[in-house]
Image (spheres, rainbow, N blue to C red):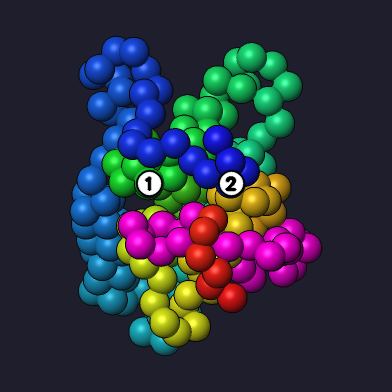
Amino acid sequence: MAYGQKPKGDGTIFKNPILDRLTRTHIAWPLSIFYGLAVVLLAYTFYEGFIGTGASILLFFAGLFGFTLVEYLIHRYTFHMEPTTKEKERLQYVLHGAHHDYPKDKTRLAMPPIVSVALASIFFIFYRLLLGKLGIPFTAGFVAGYASYLCVHYSVHAFPPPKNFLKHLWIHHALHHYQQSDAAYGVSSPLWDFFFKTMPEKRGFNVKTKTGFIDDRQNLA
């Protein structure tokens, strides 16, 4: 297989078909859950009125921004952990490796809700303990950030890049998948790649857009 090319179709993570099915989800489920949760948490904040509207909105956007950092750190240090043991290698493949092997598998572009809801609950408890009631609008922004990340991630894999500045998100993520898996960890934004100096080098990268996600055959520069 030529450099940068990926197998087509989807991959099997677990031999048990029920377990393997649990690793997949339609993108509509997590988007509905987390955008809905963000609306509920923000509405509760406004209804209870324990802080002003301006402060609530500020905390919402702080949570949204905070998610971009968490996204970067999890992608870099958890999804791309060093597989120093066979157990870690297996865990890394289950968490993220299968997605790199089969980037056009639309059923694995988001965590299954059973996992993401559990993680969101942990973050919510943490922010409530850390910030008190202020953690409610902050978490609203945080989960909205996650849903927005899913929108970007699904779009760059499923649709051709737009002919505007957003095209760079497609290119940025394609570089991570096809050329430099140790760079370009930010999906929803390259901000933290700039900050932590993990921006990729294009190195004459070529891409194709016919089937949605960029691969390595048509120049997008």
Q: Dividing the picture into quarters, in which one does residue 105 lie?
A: top left
Return the residue nearer the eye: 131 or 161: 161
Location of mark 1 (residue): 104
In this figure, what is the number of numbered marks? Answer: 2
Asked if residue 35 lies in the magenta stretch, the reply is: no
Main SS, magenta region, reads loop
Asked if residue 188 lies in the magenta stretch, the reply is: yes
- At mark 1, the secondary structure is loop
Would you say residue 37 is visible in this rendering? no
Would you say residue 14 is visible in this rendering? yes
Side of 95 where 117 appears, left or right: left
Q: Position of residue 63 (x, y in %)?
A: 49, 66
Q: Dividing the picture into quarters, in which one does residue 10 lie?
A: top left
Instruction: Identify residue type, mark 2.
Output: Gly
Q: Position of residue 28 (x, y in %)?
A: 21, 53
**Going 66% across and 42% down the picture, which residue do you hit?**
77
Is the N terminus in the top left, top right, bottom left or bottom right quadrant? top right
Q: Position of residue 144 (x, y in %)?
A: 37, 64
Q: Position of residue 58 (x, y in %)?
A: 47, 80
Q: Which residues are magenta?
A: 187-215
**Going 46% across and 61% down the picture, which residue do you hit?**
208
Is the C terminus in the top left, top right, bottom left or bottom right quadrant? bottom right
Location of mark 2 (residue): 4
